[in-house]
Amino acid sequence: MLIRAVLGFSIIETLALAGMLLWWADRVAGARLLAAFLTGIAIWITGNELPNWIGPAHQPLTFALLAFAPLTSAFFFHFCVVFCRVPLPRWGVAAAYVLGGSATLVAQVLLPAELVYKPHVGYIAIANTVGWTASLAWILLGTGGVAVLLTALARARRPAFNQIAAVTASCLWGLLCLAGYGIVILDLPVYPYPLLGLPFYPVILVYGILRYGVFVSNAWARRALAWALLLAAGAAMVALIPLLPIESRWAGGLVVAASCIALNGPVRQFAERLVYPGGAVSAADLQSWRQALQSADSMPALESEAGTLLSRRTGTQVRVLLGNGAAPPPGDMPCLLGTRAGSGWAITLHGWEAAPPGPRRVAELFGTVVADSAERVAQGEQIAARERERQLQARLAELGSLAATVAHDIRNPLNIIAMAVATASPEVRREVASQVGRIAHLSNDLLDYAKPWKLVPQRYDLAAQVRAAAARLPHCTLGAALQEPLMIDGDPRRVDQALTNLLENARAASGTEAPVAVHIDAEQRPDAVLLHVCDDGQGVPEEIRHRLFEPFASRSPGGTGLGLAIVARTLSAHGGTVALTQRPPWTTCFTLSFPLNHAHPS
């Protein structure tokens, strides 16, 4: 009766595991072949058990099911070739199927065995000459598959080594289980205990493969192991109840239930340590990680601290990269990559394919802590950015008020000075007019930079605006990309002011009487439009490059130092950037980036 239950459970379990492999067929090499092999195993066990279920009168159906054994071995051989990536010619695989199919066909046509009743197992098929001939085929194919596994095992690296080793170990376990039938056939005076281990054969085979390829299977294995241990403990307690001084069945059941509840925590912890060796993470570990990451106040600091913590825990160098622009580092170094996903952060693992399930589980749990910390740091940076913007607007408001007062107070003296030299010589009038114009220009730039302003965005063609601006400047050429429409969402008046400032900046960068050549080009990218404004002037002095876009930093002697600051402020208001870039052969190039689909402030 026990063997009947064990073999019946093996059939159901084997078919369920075959279905699981088909579900994950795209993640395991040769999964469909392995599913076919497991289905053949279930058919073979069914053939052995059928006479004991419905009686020996249906022996033709029994022998028909058992005859599929050689073809099942052909599936196993083909799986080993595909799984181990052995470069076997197609004719070799075809020969295996021809051998298995021919042996199956012979066993189907001719009578391969006879049914004999044996103690402990009931009816069993004893092979005759035809049956042994067919058996030689599946023995040969099975031996060939094991030879492929052993050859691949000798040269495999982790995690492939672990998977191939699991398949090889399952083969040895399967042979050990089949020894139970040998005990029965040889009439040995021993109970066929090896048959009781048959349910573990497909589990070892499938889980050994999925353990390193489909990591969610580890979570299922942990739950299944915990439930199996609890059921075993409950069964043991039920067997021990008669030994207790308890007569009431209700009291005995209560004792069993209470014991299982008490063992639930320790059993689950044991299952976790068994499935995830080295991967046990306690609540204290999570709290310790959170406290350690609490000190990070920026993304780079968080990346550094998180990488140090995880490297120390796993014993290998690990990098943590956060941000939508982050990319996995080249090479095989394991990495945690965090990207913004909706209202939170998504952490993905890269380069962990060769990691055992234990360290990988540690990385997954550590990733949840990193995601929470990244959200905290991101919110802190947003608050700090808003505070900086508020302080900047307050300073600009003060500066605007001061600039308006100064500009008003300066204009009257400038007009008086200009009128006072009306009767002077032409040289004096030109010099005074030049200096008065320079001061007026500075006053206007200061007012424009300091006063608060808001964008009035609309959809328009940036290329047409650039062509119109370039027409006002001699010696200005345009790239081919500016001959096609470049639609952006922006404030045309503010963008035109930025373009004018850049072109005036280029015109004033000569330092000589010779005109400066200016070239404007554009790039259309999926997320932004780039505009390059380049010239062949004297270039930007090295000492001001780091503060070029700050107020009062000028690369030309007569500049106010506010033109580029206004450009930077304009691009920032559009959600974009301006940068000093290198585009040979031009000596100076400013690249303006206009993001697409940016939400402008109202």
Image (spheres, grey):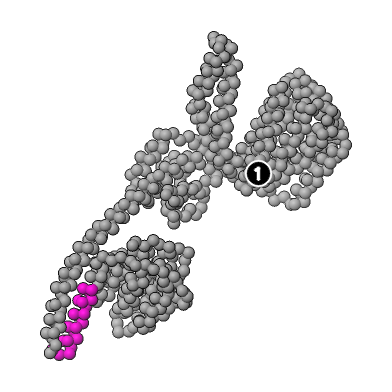
Rendering coords of residue 565 (x, y %): 29, 68
Rendering coords of residue 42 (x, y %): 72, 35
Residue marked by disc 1: 22
Q: Nearer the viewer, residue 423 or 558?
A: 423
**Residue 442 placement: quadrant:** bottom left
Rendering coords of residue 83 (x, y %): 66, 45
Rendering coords of residue 217 (x, y %): 57, 39
Of the 4 image quadrants, the one containing the C terminus is: bottom left
Q: Is residue 231 visible from the viewing direction of this image?
A: yes
User: What residue is rendered at 71% in x and 39% in y?
Assistant: 39
Neighbour class for label 1 at 10 Å: few (<14), some, many (≥20)?
some
User: What residue is rendered at 32% in x and 79% in y?
Assistant: 507
User: What residue is rendered at 25% in x and 57% in y?
Assistant: 391
Task: Report the side of 390 relative to 246 (left or right).
Answer: left
Q: Is residue 434 magenta?
A: yes
Q: Is residue 145 visible from the viewing direction of this image?
A: no
For mark 1, give the secondary structure: helix
Q: Is residue 133 magenta?
A: no
Q: Nearer the viewer, residue 366 or 173?
A: 366
Task: Report the side of 286 relative to 197 (left or right).
Answer: left
- Residue type at numbered disc 1: Leu
User: What residue is rendered at 47% in x and 42% in y?
Assistant: 363
- First to last magenta residue range: 424-444
Residue 228 in the image: above or below residue 584: above
Residue 422 in the image: above or below residue 95: below
In this figure, what is the number of numbered marks? 1
Q: Main secondary structure of the magenta part?
A: helix
Task: Report the side of 76 relative to 339 (left or right).
Answer: right
Of the 4 image quadrants, the one containing the N terminus is: top right
